[in-house]
Image (tube, grey):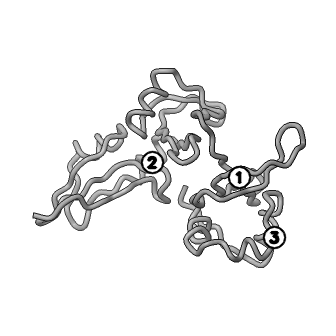
Amino acid sequence: MLEIYPINEDTWKLFEPFGFTEHDFYTLPKEDLEMLCMGQTTSLLPLQLTNSDGETVERLARLGFIRKPDGGVEVKAYPQYDEIQTGDLELSKRDIERLKRQGVIYTEAVIDGQRNRCFVQLDQLTNCLLYAKADDIGRLIPTDIHGTELTRTQREKIRQGKSVEVKVGNQTYVVGIDLEKRNGFKIWKISNY
């Protein structure tokens, strides 16, 4: 989750299976290249993908780097779907309904062959699920927001997947889980007094 992926002169070749030329890769919007380098996914991009029948089809998808077991890097596509795609996660109907309502849930799921408490988030653009082990995210929960220390109760609520408000001087911030962010959190200002 906190991995940096540098781009070198051969990086564009990883994108060839998705219909990219070297020119296509290097003319991606700057924001997309930055997102890739920070271990996040791109905006929705038009891609050429091969379906199960071996046919080339055009789809909108997000792209992101993932680390292979041998330490190498590959590109994963997250195509846009009409319905929620649970992928490898076995979620109950109740969890899927909670995801639709809340966007992020704290639940139990099988990850890497083991049952784990985890955060699961619905990517609203693709209908794919993002997930991270709760222990991994829990270690990254900030202790303070702009110098104002989070209480134990606030940190526990965040661990449960809930957002909390933090008052810093005359401003109010909301802190919550956001698996699309590099550190797993989103902090946004909601008001000034």
Q: Residues within 10 Å of mark 1 (few under 14, many from 20)?
A: some
Q: Name the N-terminal-most of marks 3 and 1.
A: 3
Mark toward the viewer: 2 or 1: 1
Residue depicted at x 61% and y 65%:
36
Question: Is the C-beta separation of discs 3 and 1 under 8 Å?
Answer: no
Query: Which residue occupies 30% across, 45% down?
Result: 163
Lateral position of residue 191 relative to residue 101, left or right: left
The residue tagged with tag 1: helix, strand or loop? strand
State how far apart marks 2 and 1 are (Cα).
22 Å
Q: Is residue 63 above or below residue 132?
A: below
Q: How far, Cα to Cα, is label 3 from label 1?
A: 17 Å
> To which residue does mark 2 refer?
137
The residue that appears at 25% across and 47% down in the rendered structure is 164
Q: Position of residue 185 (x, y in %)?
A: 40, 54
Give the amino acid at mark 3.
Answer: Thr
Amino acid of disc 1:
Lys
13 to 59, vertically: above or below: below
Which of discs 3 and 1 lies nearer the camera? The answer is: 3
* Residue 169 x, y percent position in the rendering: 12, 66
